[in-house]
Amino acid sequence: MHENYSASPRLELKPYVRAFAQRRLEKNSAELVEPVPTCLDQILNFEFGVRPVAELGDASRFTIHRLSVVGSSAYRPINMHLSGGAESFAIFFQPLAFLQLFRLPLSSLVNQDIRRACRAGK
């Protein structure tokens, strides 16, 4: 069974947080492939169960870290391969919240995730 939940933040968090989301697959679930659309959000993602594998448009693959920061993307096609036992929680930030909270320029996250940016030495 595949479950997705989403929730709006409390009023005090709305200037910074757009939404919260949780995804869970039962341990005996068959693999699920989810396309990830382009988006403008900056996302803080936590993996608690079996970690998903991301497949990029060039067919390269990598396992998602337990904690990842994902920037907005304009063109990067990704498919997420989710196995039984996957459980994720994500915080979707408002457009300027990352800059306001962490002083992190948004341009440093465009079409990047921290795993790839760190490996590339950016």
Image: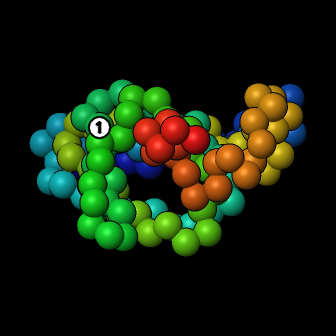
Q: Position of residue 21 (x, y in %)?
A: 54, 43
Q: Left of 82 or right of it: where is 102?
A: right
Q: Based on the displayed image, in which of its 4 quarters is residue 105 positioned? A: top right
Q: As displayed, is residue 78 above or below residue 89?
A: below
User: Residue drawn 81% across and 38% down?
Assistant: 99
Q: For this view, does 82 lie left or right of residue 75?
A: left
Reading the image, the residue beneath label 1 is 51
Q: Which quadrant of the view contains residue 87? A: top left
Residue at position x 33%, y 53% in the image? 54
Left or right placement of residue 120 versus residue 63 in this view: right
SS of the residue under disc 1: loop
Q: Is residue 55 visible?
A: yes
- Of residues 15 and 73, the one nearer the viewer is 73
Using the image as rendered, state which of residue 43 and residue 106 is in the foreground. 106
How packed mark 1 is, by other alpha carbons closer than 10 Å (few <14, some 14-19, many 20 or more), is many
Q: Is residue 97 above or below residue 48?
A: below
| Residue 55, image x, y percentages | 31, 60
Image spot of residue 16 (x, y percent): 80, 37
Three-letter residue code for mark 1: Arg
Q: Position of residue 5 (x, y in %)?
A: 50, 45
Residue appearing at x 45%, y 63% in the figure:
36
Residue at screen point 36% across, 63% down: 56
- Front residue of 9/122: it is 122
* 16 lies left or right of 27: right
Q: Identify which residue, 63 or 122, lies in the foreground.
A: 122
